[in-house]
Amino acid sequence: MSTGSDADPDSGSDPDPETAPVAALEAADERLEGLRAEPPADPGAVDTVADAYESVAEVLDRWEDRATDWDDFEGYVEFRDALSETLESIPEDVPESEAFLAADNHVKTSGVSTSLTEADFEAAREALAPARSYADYREGLSAVKDRYRRAYRIAERRRREVDDRIDDLERLRRLGDADLEAPVERLREPVERYDRAVTEAFDAFRREAPAREFLDVVRTAAGYPLVDVRAPPSELQAYVESTPAGDHPVPELLEYAEYSTSKLSHYVEEPSLLKRRVATNRTYLEELSAAPLCVGWPPPPADRLRFRSEELLSVVDRFAGEETVRAVRAVRARTREDDYDRLREAAVARAELTDAERRRLESGAVAEELDDARERRRRLTEALERYEPP
């Protein structure tokens, strides 16, 4: 069996898995099956013979300079000891055992009056050729397996990328089918009414409520998965709950944190503690806003907004007035109306479709790209199902 080009996974004739993943996977599988079909004489002993060969070859390489030095008899003795020890560690019934014995004979001297030469070592290496074929086979098989593994992983990654591309194109096509003349104001009005109301209510609550009460609402909001609010740091929460400083609104605490310790001592007990708890969390406190409580435009799909409205209602009811509560209920009710999806699609299309995308839709380019992407996914899927995962 040839262990040269057949075992080289980086041959220039192989397809590049990055640009041709299916062809690269097919080529890697063909190489792998080719190597497996042409094992050495004793396939079950590949590792045993390869390990034995490599250990002997390592001794030859390491000791050649000293063992061939006429003036270094001690080096020759140490070389012979190392080689004998290595050969003794090899099982007697190892395949190609004659190769190891022949190699050993080539690097023995007939007496103290002679020394080994480089030619002796080359002859020993040539004698090891039958055993070396096992090591070459193992190395080649490992390289081809690595190439197969890489080709398979790239094909998997490429299919995920194509899936994402198909999702984008299908979404674009849906937007192109939207009724751009639909009366989206019927959807926009309740959403914007709620967003304005909750923003005003939250800003007033942050500005006027005791920090203890304000952060308790924030902590509650953080417990709802569809309300994207980060819970207050535990040390800050504990501070406002356990000290009189929690009676002050957040803006006042942030202002106090800028005072000198001596000036701050006129306003709160333990001014140094306030600085540690408030100043170190300034960014968190300053970034708290009504944005996570807003719906935004265009709004999310009906099911998501319906569930989110339930969570928003539980939060908003704790700090906002009846007007804001009615507004979020109106948004929730709107998601149950039959025309919600149609109006939302129109709103999304108006907001997100660019002029270039409109032209691609009108020219049929999007449909062609979608057909091409689906065909690429089909080929990738067939290849991944045809070949075994690494």
Image: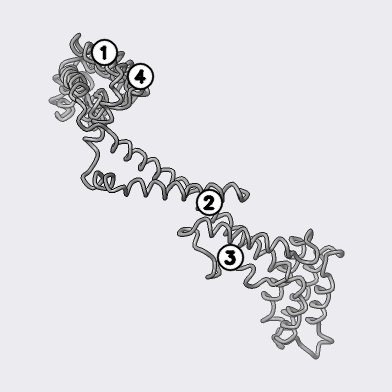
The residue drawn where x is 51% and y is 50% is: 380
Residue corresponding to mark 2: 153
Q: Earlier in the sequence, mark 1 or mark 2?
A: 2
Circle number at residue 307: 4
Residue corresponding to mark 1: 329
Count of numbered labels shown in the rendering: 4
Q: Which element carries disc 4, helix, strand or loop?
A: helix
Residue 320 higher or lower than 255, as above or below: above
Q: Along the horizontal axis of the image, is 122 left or right of 284?
A: right
Amino acid at the residue labelled 3: Pro
Residue corresponding to mark 3: 9
Residue 318: tell me if it is visible: yes
Q: Quadrant of residue 246?
A: top left
In three-dimensional space, the C-alpha distance between marks 1 and 2, rounded to whole angstroms, equals 49 Å
Q: Are the residues tagged 1 and 3 within 8 Å (C-beta)?
A: no
In three-dimensional space, the C-alpha distance between marks 2 and 4, rounded to whole angstroms, equals 38 Å
